[in-house]
Amino acid sequence: MSDNKQISFMRSLCMGEIEEELIIPFPQLNENELGTVKDILPTIDNWLKDRGPDFRKWDRQAELPPEFIEEMKQMGLFGVIIPEEHGGLGLGATAYSRVLQQVARHDGSVAITAGAHSSIGMRGLLLFGTPEQKNKYMPKLASGEMIAAFCLTEPGAGSDAASIKTKAVREGKEWVLNGEKLWITNGGIAQFFTVFARTEKEEGGQMTAFIVTRDMPGVSVGPHEDKMGLRASSTTTVFFENVRLSDEHILGEPGKGFKVAMKVLNSGRTGLGGGCVGAMKHVITEATKQAKERTQFGKPIAEYGLVKQKIGHMIVECYASEAAVNMVAGLVDQGYEDYAVEAAISKVFATECLWRTADEGLQIAGGNGYMCEFPYERIVRDCRVNRIFEGTNDILRLFIALTAMNDVGKQLKEISKSLDGIFDDPIKGFGVLSDYARRRLSAATGVANEKGTFTKIHPALKDYSTVFEEGVRDLSAAADRILRKHGKNIIGKQFATKRLADIMIDLFVLACTLSRVNSSVAAKGIANCTKEIEILTVFSGQVRRRTKGNFGKIDNNDDELIKSLADHAYEIEGYGWDTI
């Protein structure tokens, strides 16, 4: 295992390097956590397995009743990641994700209530809190006496978090906080808020993270939001009017709140990913039962090819999503610090796989799927927001691609410097070429460099590692091509960046899936892994086709025509044709 905890698998990959020690072997829970999780999972199932009618009723009523919130506290769901010395279980990212996955197999509103508390609500305290702050708040957060909420989004600041208007102004030894936060999960039941406020008057000034509690004068919440899904979970506006705070309420450093927010969101994404995997497993269970029981044209629909196709794709996407989510959690647990791109990828991929799985599950159920007495329609409603909150998938795609291109751009700049005067002394000039330039030459000629191939993959899986290695060369060429084509204008070229992001997403998830199957083969042998190899075969084929397609569209596409049609719709504010 590498001692360099600053290294990033995906950022290295964009340079043509496969840092396989980061992902091989596939991460596993340690014995202590594994035993704890194995004890927790059946307890959760026994608690929630017969609550289906309750969940359906509470969805309609748009509230988890106080007595059920009390049950969640008694089950310890609010103390899962809080250290044992403060009364929690002290579980790491992988174990926490697996616990939340189990909750999500039963109900999305329950999972998001617990998840918003641990994944983001109090995680800033866990990551940046002082010993005094942790001693003061963590025991109450572990017991559920305090439930936590994360307050970043505002009416005019969603994905653009840096544009927040909430302000904290220094008055003597205190800060005076004013503003409002929108769509705050757990807002109506929380007593502990992680709040982000601007702490300089200038537009674009610094942001600071504060601990605010419900009992402070000036803190109030709005009515429960009437939502499409996750209706039983509490979502409200939170208002701050002349709330007085001391320096002891600052999380991290003054002016470094953006760093706190991003670290919290990155660190907490394995919770959301685990929830998505749990919901997928639930849909697969229900859909397979439904397909076997429902008869059409004289036989169960489970026997029809198109139904099998739907179920098969659900299996592939669930397995791959679980591999990606667990891989990111493993990076966190092993102490790696630069996993923001990988975390964003796992969030985008898992939320979109869940959406497709929920939609196809409803389709398999037919008319029953549309009826509220069955779980499918509620799962579809509940999972739709996953592609929006904790970073919209559209913005995360830009982040994924632009992070990579920023790294490549720096190397291209290095190349331009190293080429100065190269033809005056060709022999000496070649010696000053950067490592990146040599890697580009290797990629262009198809010659593998020492870090451009896998060395720890079982020989029986060589064909799949070759697909990945080919994709890496395509990725490196795509990043280089896009930057050379658009230069500094790349920020506005969102079609191009989306294609690069989609290549990166596919390759990371393929690497995670390959690592997972590789570890299974090592542990159980090829003969006992035939179904997992089938999953890898299907997924690697999908990745290869999508990657080649995205790469081919860098220069040959209809982007300008699509934008022209959108501009026309903006101009007339609608659709411009009618048959009458």
Image (cartoon, rainbow, N blue to C red):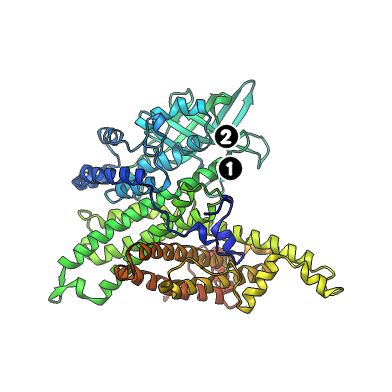
| Viewer-nearest residue: 133 or 209 | 133
Say whether marks 2 and 1 touch (CB < 8 Å).
yes
The quadrant in which the C terminus is found is bottom left
378 vs 489, left or right, is left
Q: What element carries label 1?
A: helix
173 vs 147, left or right, is right
Q: How crowded is mark 2: few (under 14 residues within 10 Å), some or many (20 or more)?
A: some
Quarter occupied by residue 500? bottom right
Observer able to see residue 43? yes
- Residue at image position (51%, 76%) is 548
Observer able to see residue 164? no
Real-space CA distance between mark 2 and mark 1, rounded to the nearest whole angstrom:
9 Å
| Identity of the residue furthest to the right in this view | 424
Q: What element carries label 2?
A: loop
What is the total number of numbered labels drawn onto the structure image?
A: 2
| Viewer-nearest residue: 234 or 47 | 47
Could you tell me the amino acid type at mark 1?
Lys
Q: Position of residue 375 (x, y in %)?
A: 24, 54
Label whose residue precedes the other's in the sequence (2 or 1): 2
Quarter occupied by residue 460? bottom left
Q: Which mark is residue 214?
A: none
- Residue at image position (26%, 44%) is 44
Answer above or below: position of 160 versus 542.
Answer: above
Q: Residues within 10 Å of mark 1 (few under 14, many from 20)?
A: some
| Viewer-nearest residue: 190 or 62 | 190
Q: Where is residue 363 in the image (x, y as percent from the top left)?
A: 27, 66
Q: Residue 252 carries which label?
A: 2
Q: Where is residue 16 in the image (x, y as percent from the top left)?
A: 60, 67
Could you tell me the amino acid type at mark 2?
Gly
Disc 1 target residue: 259
| Identity of the residue furthest to the top in this view | 172
Q: Where is residue 127 in the image (x, y as percent from the top left)?
A: 51, 38
